[in-house]
Image: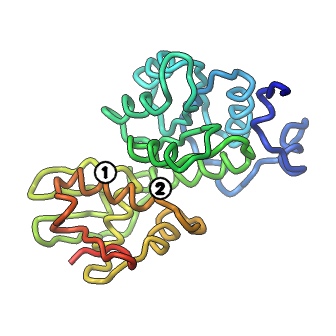
Amino acid sequence: MALLKPYDFLIFSQEALTCLRPGGYNIREEVRDMEANILVVDDEPEIADLVGVYLKSEGFTVFTCGTAAEALACVRAQSLDLAVLDVMLPDMSGFVLCGEIRKEYHFPVIMLTAKGSDMDKITGLTIGADDYITKPFNPLELVARVKAQLRRYTRYNGTEKPPTGDVIDFNGLVINRSTHECTLYDQELNLTPIEFDILWMLCENRGQVISAERLFETVWGEKYLDRNNTVMVHIRRLREKMGEPSRDPRFIKTVWGVGYKID
């Protein structure tokens, strides 16, 4: 059996290959002015460096690390806006690293894994990852996902000015879309941007049942596929943060075979 080279984990289209040539073009000029500090963690230097080339070509500042220890040191030393974490690291699982980051920081995390099972995806989302991409991958897709996460993150941290007055207040739950703040019985809930989007959508459509397909396509902006457990995992995390019992939740209720609703 032939051994895989680092570049075997990347898929190149003809469009992608032009970006590697001198004078190659930017992937999307309209977001070229987006500034962000991005951490890329992969123990294959060739992959980390190549991903860095694509991200730098879009104007991002990129920090690359080969171990979890180096990554944690970078997280504490730099002001980061997003991290791309490989699952297979020499000193610590990428899942564990993500959990360590989530103890103090809320910037988006994208998991990069060679494993494609649903359990790996669920594990990553459960411990706090915002998205995942499976090797082999197209670098253009990774950059697109990075930009999508950054747009959501910056929108909720004051970089873009959302409409004023976006506040929903009922039964002790207060959610403010303008400030990205959410409290339950006067206690702040530390929600990731995706968790906030899900909760806002349910609150905005209070009393209506929202299907998992509609939630996914609205919040993630991607086509929903059958047997996708992503929404279910995030709903479970939301309930945990809200201190709700899974069998008889007060706020987020499951309508079996249909979707979710908040009464």
Query: Which residue carries the number 2 mark?
Result: 152
Q: Which residue is rendered at x = 67% and y = 38% of the image?
A: 55
| Mark 1 or mark 2, whichever is nearer to me | 1
Give the secondary structure at mark 2. Answer: helix
In percent of width and height, residue 118 lies at 53, 50
Q: Which residue is rendered at x = 66% and y = 46% of the image?
A: 142
Please give left or right for residue 23 compared with residue 27 in the image: right
Q: Nearer the viewer, residue 1 or 27?
A: 1
Please give left or right for residue 192 compared with residue 7 in the image: left
Q: Which residue is rendered at x = 69% and y = 41% of the image?
A: 135
Identity, as a three-letter code, of the amino acid under mark 2: Arg
Query: Which residue carries the number 1 mark?
Result: 191
Q: Nearer the viewer, residue 93 or 52?
A: 93
* Render colour scheme: rainbow
Give the secondary structure at mark 1. Answer: loop
Q: Earlier in the sequence, mark 1 or mark 2?
A: 2
Residue 253 is at least partly visible in this image:
yes
Q: Nearer the viewer, residue 160 or 191?
A: 191
For residue 162, which quarter of the picture? bottom left
* The C terminus, quarter of image: bottom left
Q: 10 Å neighbourhood of mark 2: few (<14), some, or many (≥20)?
A: some
The tag on residue 180 is: none
For residue 245, which quarter of the picture? bottom left
Q: CA distance from mark 1 to mark 2?
A: 13 Å
Identity, as a three-letter code, of the amino acid under mark 1: Leu
For residue 165, which quarter of the picture? bottom left
* The N terminus, quarter of image: top right
Q: 10 Å neighbourhood of mark 1: few (<14), some, or many (≥20)?
A: some
- Is 221 located above or below residue 103 in the figure? below
